[in-house]
Image (tube, helix red, strand yellow):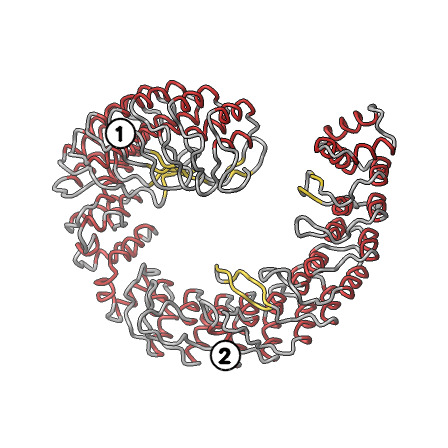
Amino acid sequence: MDSNDKRIMQMFKTSGWTSLKRLQILLSTPEPTAGAIAEQLFASALRLVDLDTVEMMLRAGMSPNNPIETVRYGALTPLQFSASIAWEEDTGLMDLLLSHEVDVNLSYNGNSALHYAIRSDCEQAMRTLLSHGAIVSPSCLRDAAMYDMSSIEIFRDFVDACEDVNARTGWQDISALAQAVESRNVAMIDILLAKGADVNSLVAIEFDDDWGTTTVLGLGVTSKKLEIIEPLLRACVNVNPDVDGLPLVSPLALAVEVGCFKITQLLLEAKLDVAAADGGGKVTLLERAVKKTNVDLCRLLIAHGAKVDRPWNHEEQSSSALLVALEMSSLEIVNLLITCGARLNDVYSRAPGTVLGAAIEKGDRALLHMLQSAGASVFPPKLRRIGNMETAIYLQQSGILQGILQICGRSILTAAILAKDHELVQYLLDINININFLATTTDVECSNSEQTPLGAAIQTRNFFVAEAILQRDARVTDSDLSHAVAATISDDNRTQFLARLLTGFLGKTPTAVGNTILLGRCDLLQLILEAGVDPTGAPQMFEEVWDLDGFCLDTPESALEIAAEQGDRSMLQILLQSAPWDPRSTGRALTIAVFLGQNDLAEDRLNFRPDVNQEITVFYPDDEDEYGDMVEARKEVFTPLQAAVKMQQVAVARKLAEHADINYLGEGAHRRTALQHAVDNGNMELVNMLLAHGADVNGAPATDGGATALQIAAIRGYLGIARRLIDLEADVNAAPAIFNGRTALEAAAEHGRIDMLQMLLNGGASITGDGEQQ
């Protein structure tokens, strides 16, 4: 823009039109072109701060209120622009504009000239605008509190000039006081409070991993600064405001959350409602204090009536202060809570399920003894581990270990093996309990993805324990086999161990099979398949997405998809012939092969009757473009044909076009039919091939961000393709996508395609839409 402005000014000064009389002629000419030239000249002079030219044009009759485009802020009034560049107390352009009847409060974007002067922190500009009648709006006062102004006196002047310091521009805006508190500016806070600023004005706040509402006092509490909180408290007439039923995050809950004893004490002395704070969040006040392991804070809260326990809920009890204290290993707080009457035998929805369970997992005999002596007696139903062997011996001597193992034995033994606590592992095995429940107590297909003691032993390469577990007739799972496959990579001698696990195995092994493919072990794949297992089903190897290089895929639904991604044709052939794969599985694998350019693998799958309309989703994470700008995460969905056309694989696309639904679009934003993909790529060969197979030139666009084939050609400027589509009666006036869509004519105009515009107009494109000019 700067170079263009300089070129325009140079042309102007060499044109002979630099006199006042000539400019008056230009401005009085009724021709639209003359007006456009004058506006462009005035805008360039303003942006270059050419005061002589600006003054001459103003004297000639140029309006000082016409908007101009700016690089930083878009369209601004000249006065807004002058305020935005007043960084060094240079207000020459502003003074010039103000001397020619400029509207000091005019705005085309909701921000006044005063707003830009505040952002520039130019006191002279601010005072100049105030002296000419600039209105100090709620947003201006908030802006003044947001920016670190060099002069507190100008802020005081703003407050004095503002009609209502508590007014807001919109319901989501925060007040000036809230902004001053957020900026931690004590001087501004004092000025606003003296003017009557409302301490109970509501603000949004992030709390407990969610968004809630608190007061300005609550916002002040998060600063953890007494010099901010004390004046807010002094000015607060009602520390327990009525908020019309809105869920309020109490300042007291915020004080406890930040773990500050002094601030909490101040609020309690000010009589903030303890019961409201206790019931206003996801956890109680005492639970928050316990998480900080602050005994004094716990005592303070209890002394002021904070709940020791949550209200009893027979449907779900998720936690308690006592459970948290045990998890934090705070013996002093546990003792305090027991003394204050905390319930000892609640059963919780989350592991380990009881307070006894928390003590057992910690392996703290002192805590266990304290709880049992106080009356805790309920077995933990979700125990994940026993802290150490001493705790296990104590439980055995107390006569409760067998009962615990009958409920939670599998997870306990697994945790001990993974922790490599060999003494505890041996102790648990020596008890000679029924090992079957340690392996699994449910149907094998339901538990294949879960870790088992056998799998843990293999994973930690503790084959002595693995043998001991097998000797107890433990059931082998798909997960165990997968760990055994991984073990053979570091030690080929373990192949015999894998073969032993396969003996008599019944069930599906997609995870183990998937692992052999990932590890490139065709010999292990054949070993598994020769055992007569079923390789179908979903491998349990990825949690939510399948993370690849630069993008992610859906979690694979079969090992065939892993083979497609790995590009191993021989392993794919073995897999395809090993079981009766359903069309969905072969279809999804086909789409992946096509998307990744594995053409040979794609052809192999076509021989196994895949569903050629199966879709896969490709996820692209946040990224930077070549200019360093952030590109937001997005996703694309493809059928095999759509993927082949998108990747411009002509031979595969030609084969797929014979079987697939050629006009299939699919659900979701930014979807494309195969023809629309071909046009997007400008690939005339694929366009002609698809048209020959019956592709619809007027296929509908996706609801959000979609486009017809002709609209895409107009966006891209592909004249030849557009001509071909129009000749085949493509609708030049087809409706755009409902969201983020363009007609073909709009698309061509937006992208400056003059030749395309002419072609569309010649083809009958209408320049009007639904009653309005496009």
Q: Mark 1 and mark 2: span between their CA atoms?
A: 70 Å
Q: Quadrant of the N terminus?
A: top right
SS assignment at label 2: helix
Q: Position of residue 108 (x, y in %)?
A: 67, 48
Residue 666 located left or right of residue 444: right
Q: Residue at x 30, y 39 (%)?
A: 556
Where, by quadrant of the figure, is residue 611 drawn? top left
Q: Nearer the viewer, residue 462 or 573?
A: 573
Residue 391 image offset from top left, x and y in percent:
32, 64
Toward which corner of the image does residue 491 lie, by quadrant? top left
Q: Nearer the viewer, mark 1 or mark 2?
A: 1
Looking at the rendered structure, the secondary structure element under dot 1 is loop
State the image quarter where residue 690 is shown: top left
Quickly name the residue at label 1: 660
Residue 90 in sight in this render? no
In this image, 400 relative to 718: left or right? left
Q: Position of residue 742 (x, y in %)?
A: 48, 36
Q: Label 1 sits on what residue type?
A: Ala
- Of 330 and 511, the residue lying toward us: 511
Q: Is residue 588 above or below residue 183?
A: above
Please rate how many residues cluster around mark 2, counting C-alpha atoms within 10 Å: few if below 14, some from 14 to 19, many from 20. some
Which residue: 28% across, 49% down?
A: 451
Q: Which mark is residue 519?
A: none
Q: Amino acid at mark 2?
A: Ile
Q: Nearer the viewer, residue 447 or 215?
A: 215
- Residue 697 screen position, x and y as percent: 37, 28
Label 1 CA crowd tier, 10 Å (few <14, some 14–19, many 20+): some
Q: Say which residue label 2 marks.
A: 302
Q: Residue at x 86, y 40 (%)?
A: 59
Residue 256 visible: yes
Q: Of label 1 and label 2, which has the lower sequence position?
A: 2
Q: Is residue 152 left or right of residue 571?
A: right
